[in-house]
Amino acid sequence: MIKLIELRKLVKVSQFLALLLLSSASHAQDATFIDNVLTLPKATVGEAAYALELGLSVNQGNYDFGVLAAAEIPFTGTEGASVFDGAVLRVPTVDVGGTNYSLDLALISGDPIIFRLSSYAEVAAPTPTALAQATALFDESIETQIVQGKCIVCHKVGLLANDSGLLFASTSQGSAATNLGAFANYLNGSEAARTRILSMVTGVGHTGGQQMNAGDEQHQALGEMLRLLLEHQAGI
Ligand code: HEC
């Protein structure tokens, strides 16, 4: 508990300086480690939150961090925050030269405050969900180039493919989401529906004729996007 009070005291003392130093960086959410300075945009102690800058010094093979600057910031929960439990400051992720690490910094001195690196581990980059990947691919390579560029002239209410089971919306804010949804509804978890789309766009049994060549870049993008949608629908 003494440690906690010490931290609060120090925070008050250095607040003015810290606010000057951190005002530019305070919007950044991720911890960084640059030029031996560990910047923690959000470190929580109980229900208080601080932006901290810790300076690294190597002492007899130990990695020690002293407080360079600290500023109290509004407490908005501990999500994504470094959390100090009175003994250990846990940094969930910090980019060090392109690799993300989690760090445990043990408080070894209260006055001055010094943390010592007690353990670290590499943090695997989270894999985006199948739906997120499908959405990204759709926005990047399909909505404009394929749906608006090729399909919409027929696959829209009132046009030639009005009675088909695949209707799109013209470009507008939100049309990409609507059109991704149209593909998702058409698929409805069925691999056969995916195969049907992929063969019809090459002209097989399609009143709309050949829209792309089997295996070309657009055909592959469409196939991959539909595969990801199915993966999402299967709950993988
Ligand atoms: C020149 C008009 C035209 C264009 C362009 C066109 N289609 Fe079609 N498409 C149709 C018509 C008409 C039908 C309904 C009759 C049929 O099945 O051939 C259809 C049917 C389909 C079906 C079967 C729907 C069902 O009910 O099972 C799919 C899948 C399809 N099109 C995909 C596409 C895609 C994807 C594109 C864009 C790359 C596209 N089409 C471009 C006219 C078109």
Image (cartoon, grey):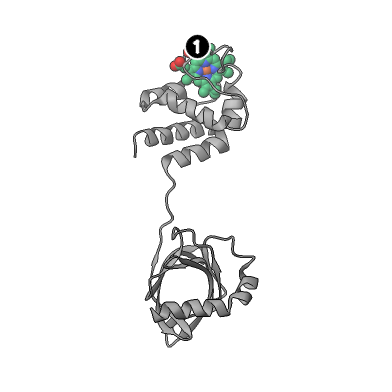
Can the viewer see residue 209 in this picture? no
Residue depicted at 63% across the width and 76% down the height: 17
Q: Residue furthest bottom?
A: 60
Residue 124 screen position, x and y as percent: 41, 58
90 or 162, which is in the foreground? 90
Q: Quadrant of residue 63?
A: bottom left
Count up the numbered dots: 1
Residue depicted at 40% across the width and 64% down the height: 122
Work out which quarter of the rendered image holds the N terminus and state it. Answer: bottom left
Q: Quadrant of residue 35?
A: bottom right
Residue 132 screen position, x and y as percent: 47, 41
- SS assignment at label 1: loop
Residue 232 vertical position relative to residue 60 in the rendered view, above or below: above
Classify mark 1 as within 8 Å of ligand 1 or not, answering yes or no: yes
Residue 47 screen position, x and y as percent: 44, 65
Residue depicted at 50% across the width and 38% down the height: 135
Residue 65 screen position, x and y as percent: 48, 79
Work out which quarter of the rendered image holds the C terminus and state it. Answer: top left
Residue 98 vertical position relative to residue 222 in the rendered view, above or below: below
Residue 182 vertical position relative to residue 17 in the rendered view, above or below: above
User: What amino acid type is highlighted by mark number 1?
Assistant: Asp
Can the viewer see residue 137 in this picture? yes
Residue topped by disc 1: 163
Residue depicted at 52% across the width and 20% down the height: 167
Within 10 Å of the Cα at label 1, are there few (<14), some (14-19), or many (20+) other Cα atoms? few
